[in-house]
Amino acid sequence: MAANLLGFTNVDNQGIEGVEKSFNAQLTGKPGRRLVRKDKHGNVIENITEVPPVPAHNLQLSIDERLQTVTEDALDNAVRWNKAESGAAVLIKIDTGEILAMASYPDFNPNNRDSATLDDFRNRAISDTFEPGSTVKPLVIMTALQQGIVQPDSVVDTHPFVLDGHRIRDVGYYPELSLTGILQKSSDTGVSHLSLAMPVQHLIDTYKAFGFGEPTGLGLTGESAGLMPHRRYWGQLDRATFAFGYGLMVTPLQLAHVYATIGGFGIARPLSITRIDPPVMGTRVMPESIVHSVEHMMESVALPGGGGTKAAVRDYRVAVKTGTAKKIGPDGKYIDKYVAYTAGVAPASRPQFALVVVMNDPSNGSYYGGAVSAPVFSQIMGDVLRLENVMPDGMPQGAENLIVMHDSHPQGPAL
């Protein structure tokens, strides 16, 4: 269990992978030493200095064995079924920042490593980076609300349009959508209009405030910082695609941290792989009212008409966002391979857990996040909520207003 996370030691009990390596000093301690003077026969005649040994310490991880097991099992089965190259999943306890489960596939048997490759040892949840696709759209809407560009009941023009010779369009055709509709239908045109209506630095600042572009501080060796763009000039196409998750690179762990902050209604808490008591207060990065409003909009994604209905969990409200991003080939150009995401929090009425599921290059027909990673999210989150005896919260209030089944003309100020 958790082989990629825990790692292993060498014959001298020195950690060389995973937690064993990252916390080697605490787990092994330090031997003492003594400087003495001896006579010609080798007998100690004087103690000059003495440094006592530092004992090893027990390390109480935050990983919950039950939740780790259900996360690993669901991820392993999904990667095999979808014939994906790899997969990762991260589960966070929102009010503490503790990592409750972290799974990576392919993995290895720590008791028999002879057949494992270096690639099998990698903890993909912290080391692999991808463009996050539509999972960033809630952050775009939060930024637009914070800057006063739109109001919660605003309507946005979502007609297809052309930028720098490239056509920006959605999978479905919707002339206009509410902010809820933009999330439910995952409208690239909608978030593009929002991004183009404000200085790009505002969106960059939000992405960074939520944790993109720097390591999470978890303390695990091999964690990537991801990549935030540093451009002197942003063309309109760059600004548009930045709003639906292209032009930056993130790890599954960073994305899970972002969604834990959403579940905390704008409070970003440090992440920890060890048990935390008492919880850390955290830092507010977005007004609570804005995050709460957008989190409620995100519930529409798993409701009828949304792109993430397969992420729904029976008897519970979930606030999710799916995403699908093209991969970049060795020559730096996009290729016909994809990364499928589902990220979200539950129960949506009082979020306790944030979960991200990433499937890298699924090749069994479907490759969209709503088809590939959403069912895995549903299975894991459902098991977690039931194992933790979380009270069901049923359908959201005003659920009928969150369902956008077809072209609609909602009331509100237009952008």
Image (cartoon, helix red, strand yellow):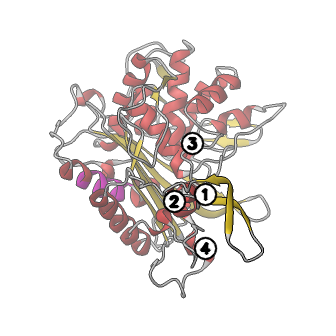
Task: Tell me the SS state at disc 2.
Answer: helix
Q: Amino acid at mark 1?
A: Ser
Q: Position of residue 229 (x, y in %)?
A: 74, 39
Residue nearest the observer in this picture, 50 or 48: 48
For label 1, the residue is 127
What whole-number distance in Å separates the C-alpha atoms at marks 3 and 4? Answer: 23 Å
Asked if labels 4 and 3 touch by Cβ distance under 8 angstroms, the answer is: no
Judge whether 242 appears above or below 273 on screen. Answer: above
Quadrant location of the N terminus?
bottom left
Residue nearest the observer in this picture, 118 or 87: 118
Mark nearer the N terminus (2 vs 4):
2
Task: Tell me the SS state at disc 4.
Answer: helix
Q: Position of residue 185 (x, y in %)?
A: 43, 40
Circle 2 packing at 10 Å, graded few (<14), some (14-19), many (20+), is many
Q: Position of residue 52 (x, y in %)?
A: 57, 54
What whole-number distance in Å separates the C-alpha atoms at marks 3 and 1? Answer: 12 Å
What whole-number distance in Å separates the C-alpha atoms at marks 2 and 4? Answer: 17 Å
Asked if labels 1 and 3 touch by Cβ distance under 8 angstroms, the answer is: no
State which mark lies toward you, 3 or 2: 2
The prevailing secondary structure element of the residues shown in magenta is helix
Does the stretch in magenta take in 45? no
Mark nearer the N terminus (3 vs 1):
1
For label 2, the residue is 19
Residue 213 falls in image quadrant: top right
Mark nearer the N terminus (3 vs 4):
4
> Range of the magenta residues?
374-383
Q: Amino acid at mark 3?
A: Thr
Residue 63 seen from this side: yes
Residue drawn where x is 54% and y is 87% of the image: 115
For label 4, the residue is 119
Q: Position of residue 404 (x, y in %)?
A: 34, 34
